[in-house]
Each structure stands twice: as structure tokens, then as C-alpha cells.
Amino acid sequence: MPAAPSRAYYRQLVVDSPSLQANLLGDPTRRLLPVYVPPQYEAEPERRFPVVFYLAGYAGWGGQKLGEKSWEEPIHLALDRLIGAGNLPPLLVAFPDGFTKLGGAQYRNSPVCGNYLDYLCNDLVAAVDRELRTLAHRDARGVMGKSSGGYGALLAGAERPDVFGHVCSTAGDSAFDLSYRLDLGKCFQVLRRYPQPADFVEQFIAKASRSAQEFSAMMVIAYAQAYSPNPAVPGILCDLPFDMETGDLRSDVWQRWLDCDPVRFAPRRAEALKSLKTLYLDAGTSDEWCLDIGHRILARQLQQAGVPHQLEEFEGGHMGNDQRILVSLQRIAANL
């Protein structure tokens, strides 16, 4: 049974995002942004604090991390505990909403989903700096996440090192040739049951329950809206990376996906990544999408490009490892 709160752990900001206004999905531009504040925020009213943005994975949003679960320490109590013990400096943690009608946009700018990288780096950062007492510079600002959130963190660090000086990615999407190919097959198997992919999307959203294979299919379509958007395609507004008759890869579309792969874009953005104060990668050694291997490949690319980084592996798979949030926060805190 949850205990009565001893203080206000979160500030709930409301952000109306210019970056999302042109999205073709009809998704809301006005969204909530909960921000954890440490005990020192009220106790020391003249003090300013570093900020870390935590990016949720596909089909999630930041506010989901704030709920309490059986036999698990809530994130706000864990943060209070670590700060109280001196294992974390007092800091703010923001939990953005990156959800779309199809589940997420990989925190990329897309003519279909909206400009989620700009939403994060411009709109949300500006709102937190405006509404709360922050240390408003990149060396006191980090971004982290798991899975698609880890991908978003890597993308933000590579493209906007002027905004974020610290990046942590837990099992971030990477090495697409290895991690995504099986899901493409699952997507094809589902979509061939429907007259058009748009029919599947409509029925998926309306369903009360969804199979794991259907979830994989929707995930692929959502990724396509981020990696290979095409507003001219009816219903789904993207090019799928496989042939709808055979399931074989469409090499031209798949190349667009590969261009978005961290193992491909990291070497191109080596100078930007070298400027980061923290670049930390971790993944479970039994990751179901083999993202531990993806991070190993990415780490090799970073090493060859002379980009300082840290790679760590832990026992476990892709799910059920929210405790890594605290590990990443401690890695960032060591360099704040």
C-alpha cells in the first residue's frame, strides 16, 4: 500500500509545442511534462540545479515511470534516497511524452509524426529552463533512456551536443540489420491478412487486446513513419521496408533505415560526440533484440573514431530493468 506523500515530488509543466504543430497524425501539441524536484529545491530557494531528461521507449511516455508498482521502489523515493545518501547530487529529472498515434517517433524529426527532436531539444528544454531553477547550459544537462528512448538519447547527443552534454543509452536501438530484421518478417505476416496496412492500423488501435506479433507489426509501421516517412502513401504515410507481395527487403527503403542507425551515424557525427562530457552505453546480455550486440558494435565504431565512451553489460534481457535508470543517472552525475 503506497504511503502518503511527504512532499510534492513533481512539478507538472504544460508545454504547447510549436515543433509538433505540423504533425499529420492529429496528435496533440499540448502535453504534460512532469519533472522530479529534489528536497533541496524548496529548502534552498536560491539554488539552481542540473537537469536530466528521461526518454521512454516505444509505446510508452515519461509519465508512466512515475506510478508505483508492487514490490518496487518508486522512482521519486529512489531519487530521494540516493540524493540523501550523497550518491547523487540534487538534480531535476524530466519525463517527456513522446507518444504518437502509432506508439512513438524515435525522437526524430519527421514530416509525418512531427519534429520530435526539436520538441525535445527546443520546446521541452526551454520550458524547463523557463519554469524551474535550472543550470541552463549543456554541461549541466543530460539525456537518457532505454530502447527507443536510448536511441533518442544517442540521436540527441549526436545532433544537438549544444543542448546536451551527457548521454546514456540503455539497450538503445542499434545495428538494425541484426535487431530489426525479425520484426520486419512478423510485420509482413500480420499485414498480409488485411486488404491494406491502414486497415490493420485502424483495427489495432480499436482492439481491447493485441498479440505480441501485432505489437511488432505496429512498431515497424511506427518506425517507418520515423525512418522512411512518405506523406503520399495512403493511410500509413510511410514506405515500408519490405515488398508487400513477397516480404523481401526493399533495398532503397531499407537503406533509408540504415542511414538512421547509430552504428552508421555515430562515425559521421564523431566530432559532435567527442564533445560530450558523458557517453555511456549499457545493455543486458540476454537482450531479446540483441541490443547488447548492437551496443558492442556501436562501441567499436566509437573507439575507431576516437570518441570517449563507456560500455557496460549486465545480466538480464530487454524488459524489467528499470533499475538501470538509477545507474545511468549516477554515471551522468559523476561528470556534472
Image (tube, grey):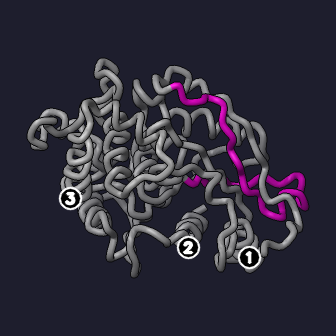
Query: Looking at the picture, does residue 179 appear above or below residue 27?
Result: below
Which secondary structure lies at badge 1?
helix
- Residue, x 59% and y 24% (percent of image)? 18
Residue, disc 1 = 81
Type of amino acid under label 2:
Gln
Please provide percent x and percent y for residue 315. 39, 81
Q: CA distance from mark 1 to mark 3?
A: 39 Å
Q: What span is in magenta? A: 26-54
Query: Looking at the picture, does residue 236 appear above or below residue 156?
Result: above
Query: Looking at the picture, does residue 249 appear above or below residue 48?
Result: above
Please provide percent x and percent y for residue 254. 18, 40
| Quadrant in the rendering for residue 221 | top left
Whether residue 104 is visible, yes or no, is no
- Residue, x 20% and y 58% (percent of image)? 178
Q: Earlier in the sequence, mark 1 or mark 3?
A: 1
Residue, disc 2 = 323
Q: Earlier in the sequence, mark 3 or mark 2?
A: 3
| Quarter of the rendering occupied by the C terminus | bottom right
278 displayed left or right of 313: right
Please provide percent x and percent y for residue 182. 21, 56
Residue, disc 3 = 178
Type of amino acid under label 1:
Arg
Please provide percent x and percent y for residue 42. 89, 57
Q: In this orientation, which residue lies closer to the viewer: 260 or 212?
A: 212
69 displayed left or right of 84: left
Q: Could you classify mark 1 by the number of other residues whose Cα lies within 10 Å: few (under 14), some (14-19), or many (20 or more)?
A: few
- Residue, x 78% and y 75% (percent of image)? 1
Whether the magenta-drawn stretch holds residue 99 is answered as no
* Marking on residue 205: none
